[in-house]
Image: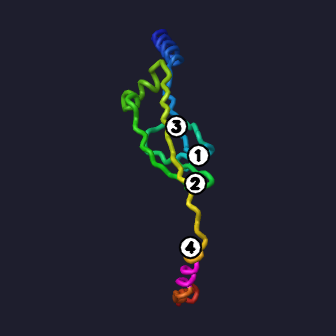
């Protein structure tokens, strides 16, 4: 019995040593080289960025560059055929070859529009006028209970 168990364990170790895995990566490219990229609010680095991921689902990609409007893009990452339940265990743990899953994400940043100073000052003055026309706030003092 012990001999059979040792044989099975030995075969399993030999088999496990030769198994591959699934390597998943995003390659995030922006139309602005060097744009700062983050995935799910985690900074990744400048574009083109390369990051590993584990699970399919919805990911939020963000790119920021000076002179461009910040961009937030939500992308649904769908599983490939070897990631479906039942098959995923086989290809993650038993399949003897390496599988590389690279998803390329393209982000298109738009140039920022210059702010017109006169419009900004007019909006600020209007807001100040509205604030000054409000009635004074009522303050209830919790100590006097009024």
Judge the density around disc 1: few (<14), some (14-19), many (≥20) Cα neighbours within 10 Å.
many
Task: Rate crowding at label 3 as few (under 14), some (14 to 19) or many (20 or more) other CA atoms within 10 Å.
Answer: some
Residue on which disc 3 sits: 26
3D distance between C-alphas at marks 4 and 3: 41 Å
Q: Quadrant of residue 78?
A: top left
Q: Residue 138, can we see it?
A: no
In x, y percent, where is residue 107? 51, 45
| Lower position in the chain sequence, tag 4 or tag 3 | 3
What is the span of residues highlighted in magenta in the rendered image?
124-131
Residue at mark 4 to residue at mark 1: CA–CA distance: 29 Å
- CA gap between label 1 and label 3 equals 17 Å
Res 32 label: 1
Determine whether 31 is above or below 115 in the image: above
Q: Which residue is rendered at x = 50% and y = 27% of the image?
A: 100
> Magenta region's main secondary structure?
helix
Image quarter hosting the N terminus: top left
Element assignment for label 4: helix
User: Cβ–Cβ below 8 Å for labels 4 and 3?
Assistant: no
Whether pointer 4 and pointer 1 mark residues with C-beta atoms closer than 8 Å, the reply is: no
Q: Nearer the viewer, residue 3 or 87?
A: 87
| Badge 2 or badge 4: first in the primary sequence | 2
- Mark in the foreground, 3 or 2: 2
Q: Which residue is mark 2?
A: 68
Label 1 secondary element: loop
- Choose the circle earlier in sequence order: 3 or 2: 3
The number of numbered discs placed on residues in the rendered structure image is 4
Judging from the image, what secondary structure is the residue with disc 3 in? Answer: strand
The Cα–Cα distance between marks 2 and 4, rounded to whole angstroms, is 20 Å
Q: Position of residue 8 (x, y in %)?
A: 46, 13
Label of residue 119 in the image: 4
């Amino acid at each position: 019995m012990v001999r059979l168990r040792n044989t099975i364990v030995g075969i399993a170790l030999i088999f496990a040593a030769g198994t591959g895995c699934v390597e998943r990566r995003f390659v995030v490219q922006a139309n602005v080289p060097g744009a700062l990229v983050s995935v799910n609010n985690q900074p990744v680095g400048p574009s083109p960025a390369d990051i590993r991921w584990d699970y399919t689902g919805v990911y939020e990609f963000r790119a920021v560059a000076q002179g461009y409007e910040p961009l937030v893009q939500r992308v649904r990452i769908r599983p490939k055929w070897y990631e479906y339940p039942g098959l995923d265990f086989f290809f993650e743990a038993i399949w003897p070859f390496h599988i590389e899953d690279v998803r390329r994400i393209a982000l298109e940043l738009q140039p920022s529009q210059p702010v017109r100073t006169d419009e900004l000052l007019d909006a600020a003055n209007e807001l100040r006028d509205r604030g000054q026309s409000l009635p004074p706030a009522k303050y209830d003092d919790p100590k006097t209970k009024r």
